[in-house]
Each structure stands twice: as C-alpha cells, then as structure tokens.
Image (tube, grey):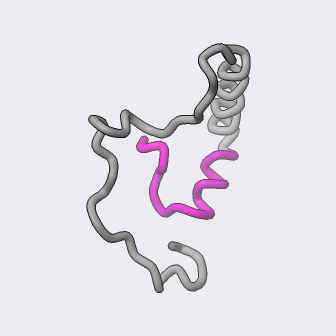
C-alpha cells in the first residue's frame, strides 16, 4: 500500500486475526518429523531479526510491524 499505485487499494471487511481461528502470529508449514529443518528456520528468522534485515525488508511492504511487536 505504500508503493506507487497503492492508493488505489484499501483493506475491506473484518480483520482476520481472531486467535480462535488463526492462532497467534504467523507460521511456516513444516512436517512434524522435520525437526532439524524447523530449528534451521527458527535460527534463520532470529538472525534476520537480530541484524535488522527483517525490519528493512518488512518496511518496503508494510507501514506496520507484521510481527505484532
């Protein structure tokens, strides 16, 4: 929405954030047996956030913190 042409769009309808249906936050689907992959994804996301890279990328597309913090 904060890109050229974004003013032509708007959010409509209710916000779909009810934890009853969607839980808290976002997720990545990984098979239960892929424990090592889950650890690697968790570590990669944490590293991106600690280095500020995640925030730089998110700022290009959102004018709010999609992490909710």
Expressed as whole percent of the image width and height from the top left, the position of residue 60 reads: 62, 63
- Residue 14: quarter of image: bottom left
Mark count: 0
Left or right, 22 with respect to 57, comes to: left
Expressed as whole percent of the image width and height from the top left, the position of residue 27 reads: 53, 35
| Image position of 25 with respect to 41: above or below | below
Left or right, 36 with respect to 9, comes to: right
Q: Residue at x 42, y 41 (%)?
A: 69
Expressed as whole percent of the image width and height from the top left, the position of residue 22 reads: 37, 39
Q: Residue at x 48, y 49 (%)?
A: 66
Q: Residue at x 59, y 33 (%)?
A: 29
> Observer-nearest residue: 13 or 48?
13
As for residue 33 lying within the magenta part, the answer is: no
> Observer-nearest residue: 25 or 58?
25
| Image position of 13 with respect to 3: above or below | above
> Observer-nearest residue: 3 or 10?
10
As for residue 67 lying within the magenta part, the answer is: yes
Expressed as whole percent of the image width and height from the top left, the position of residue 5 reads: 56, 85
Q: In the rendered structure, which segment of residues is drawn in magenta? A: 53-69
Q: Residue at x 69, y 46 (%)?
A: 53
């Amino acid at each position: 929405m904060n890109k050229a042409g974004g003013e032509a769009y708007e959010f409509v309808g209710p916000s779909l954030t009810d934890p009853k249906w969607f839980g808290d936050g976002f997720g990545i689907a990984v098979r239960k047996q892929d424990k090592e992959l889950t650890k690697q994804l968790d570590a990669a996301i944490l590293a991106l956030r600690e280095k500020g890279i995640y925030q730089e990328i998110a700022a290009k597309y959102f004018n709010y913190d999609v992490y909710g913090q």
